[in-house]
Image (spheres, rainbow, N blue to C red):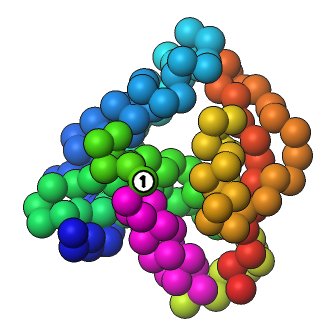
């Protein structure tokens, strides 16, 4: 299976929203309180994604042919804000390919921060650890959304 990683544009916002919401509802939401689910649902609405895209956040897509199978969002200074793989396509190395592209882009940009940070949902910390992230604090909860702060060296 050929996987191609590219930066998203506004024509792909609905697909970004759909993949993030589908994966979140299946894998993350069962561990969240209702207010966390509502907060995330608002966060991944097409309108909010468009606003973040226009404000400078970078969105990445993983594609097999023309089908979008994975997404990620980064924001300044070096934060991985969203990272989802279509449920039916998980465990095939797609997430690793997206992350390798993000890491490569950050290295080329010579970012001031020496780390990529992420607020990992509790059920995804093992995935981030497989990618080389390390926890930097205990689990937190903000607006009903639970996460573990983690970081990965950019070097």
Residue shown at the point (62%, 12%) measured from the top left = 33
Q: Is residue 36 visible?
A: yes
- Measuring from the top left, give residue 60's x and y in whole percent: 37, 63
- Measuring from the top left, give residue 24's x and y in whole percent: 45, 31
Point out the residue furthest to the left here.
66
The foreground one among 110 and 151 is 151
Is-magenta flag for residue 106?
yes
The quarter of the rendered structure image containing the N terminus is: bottom left
* Magenta stretch: helix, strand or loop mostly: helix
Q: Is residue 46 visible?
A: no
Q: Which residue is mark 1?
A: 91
Question: Where are the magenta residues, as a range?
Answer: 92-107
Q: Is residue 1 above or below residue 126?
A: below
Where on the picture, by quarter, is residue 65? bottom left
Query: In the visual, does 47 lie left or right of 67?
Result: right
- Measuring from the top left, give residue 105's x and y in whole percent: 50, 81
Residue shown at the point (52%, 22%) measured from the top left = 29
Residue shown at the point (42%, 71%) measured from the top left = 97
The foreground one among 18 and 3 is 3
Q: Secondary structure at mark 1?
A: loop
Point out the residue furthest to the right here.
137
The quarter of the rendered structure image containing the C terminus is: bottom right
Is-magenta flag for residue 44?
no
């Amino acid at each position: 299976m050929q996987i191609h990683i590219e930066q998203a544009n506004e024509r792909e916002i609905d697909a970004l929203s759909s993949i993030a919401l589908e994966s979140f509802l299946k894998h993350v939401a069962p561990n969240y309180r209702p207010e966390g689910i509502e907060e995330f649902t608002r966060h991944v609405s097409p309108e909010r994604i468009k606003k973040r895209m226009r404000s400078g956040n970078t969105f990445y897509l993983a594609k097999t042919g023309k089908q979008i199978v994975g997404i990620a969002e980064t924001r300044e200074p070096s934060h991985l804000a969203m990272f989802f793989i279509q449920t039916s396509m998980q465990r095939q190395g797609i997430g690793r390919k997206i992350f390798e592209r993000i890491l490569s882009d950050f290295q080329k940009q010579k970012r001031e921060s020496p780390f990529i940070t992420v607020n990992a949902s509790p059920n995804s910390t093992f995935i981030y650890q497989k990618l080389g992230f390390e926890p930097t604090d205990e689990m937190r909860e903000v607006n009903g959304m639970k996460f573990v702060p983690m970081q990965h060296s950019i070097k």
